[in-house]
Image (cartoon, rainbow, N blue to C red):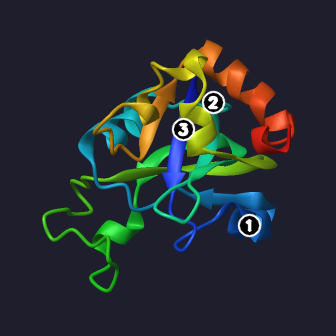
């Protein structure tokens, strides 16, 4: 099993939206970065776990845990000319973009980016590296375990 961090803007799709979804499952659509696409297409396996990360919002951070529930398949939004994710160079015969389905495992307390940055144990975590804007990144097993501990504790400013 591998671990991941998957970013979503809560104004587009939040952890609460996933909680309300049928079977608490959704396709992870709209990824338009080749490296992130390749992670979904080539590396993600059924049962892999991922942090659901709220990005580009007032308080970015980890909001929950999801698991990969369906392997990569063509992202239908690339063919929909009304979608903001439409790609005129993509065809049904040769789709450029894929998505996986994720299923909610658990909503957690929000573990804010500021808290993640304050932990020396996470200094090498990809999402914390300067200039990293990937919407999907691998998470090392030690980072996963450490963050799981953080997510189960009260926020640091409440100490």
Q: Residue at x 58, y 30 (%)?
A: 118
Relative to 125, is 89 above or below?
below
Q: Nearer the viewer, mark 2 or mark 1?
A: 1
The image position of residue 111, as x and y in percent, is: 69, 44
Report x, y in % for residue 49. Answer: 66, 33
Q: Position of residue 151 (x, y in %)?
A: 78, 37
Q: Residue at x 44, y 41 (%)?
A: 136
On the rendered structure, is 39 left or right of 118? left
Which is nearer the N-term, disc 2 or disc 3?
3
Question: For numbered disc 1, what is the local secondary structure?
Answer: helix
Q: Which residue is mark 3?
A: 5
Disc on the earlier residue, 3 or 1: 3
- In the rendered structure, the answer to whether residue 130 lies left or right of residue 146 reads left
Tell me the tag on residue 130: none
Residue 17 spot, x, y in % from top left: 69, 69
Q: Horizontal placement of 46 versus 74: left or right?
A: right
Viewer-proximal residue among 140 and 88:
140
Residue that mark 2 sits on:
48
Secondary structure type for disc 3 = strand
The residues tagged by marks 2 and 3 sit, at their Cα atoms, a distance apart of 11 Å
Mark 2–mark 1 CB contact (< 8 Å): no
Kindly tell me whether residue 42 is visible in this rendering. Answer: yes
Residue at the spot of label 1 = 16
Residue 69 appears in the picture as rendered = no
Q: Quadrant of the N terminus?
A: top right
Looking at the rendering, which quadrant does residue 34 occupy?
A: top left
On the rendered image, what quadrant is the C terminus found in?
top right
Binning the other alpha carbons within 10 Å of mark 3 as few (below 14), some (14 to 19) or many (20 upward) gives many
In this view, which residue lies farthest toward the bottom? 82
User: At numbered mark 2, what does the secondary structure look like: helix, strand or loop?
Assistant: loop
Q: How many numbered marks, from 0 up?
A: 3
């Amino acid at each position: 099993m591998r671990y991941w961090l998957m970013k979503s803007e809560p104004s587009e799709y939040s952890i609460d939206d996933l909680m309300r979804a049928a079977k608490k499952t959704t396709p992870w659509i709209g990824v338009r970065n080749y490296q992130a696409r390749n992670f979904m297409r080539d590396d993600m396996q059924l049962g892999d776990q991922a942090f659901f990360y709220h990005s580009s919002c007032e308080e970015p951070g980890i909001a929950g845990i999801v698991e990969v529930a369906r392997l990569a398949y063509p992202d239908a939004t690339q063919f929909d000319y009304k979608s903001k994710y439409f790609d005129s160079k993509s065809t049904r015969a040769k789709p450029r973009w894929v998505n996986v389905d994720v299923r909610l495992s658990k909503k957690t307390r929000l573990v804010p980016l500021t808290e993640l940055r304050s932990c020396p144990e996470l200094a090498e975590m990809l999402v914390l590296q300067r200039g990293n804007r990937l919407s999907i990144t691998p998470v090392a097993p030690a980072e996963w375990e450490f963050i799981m501990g953080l997510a189960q504790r009260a926020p640091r400013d409440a100490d």
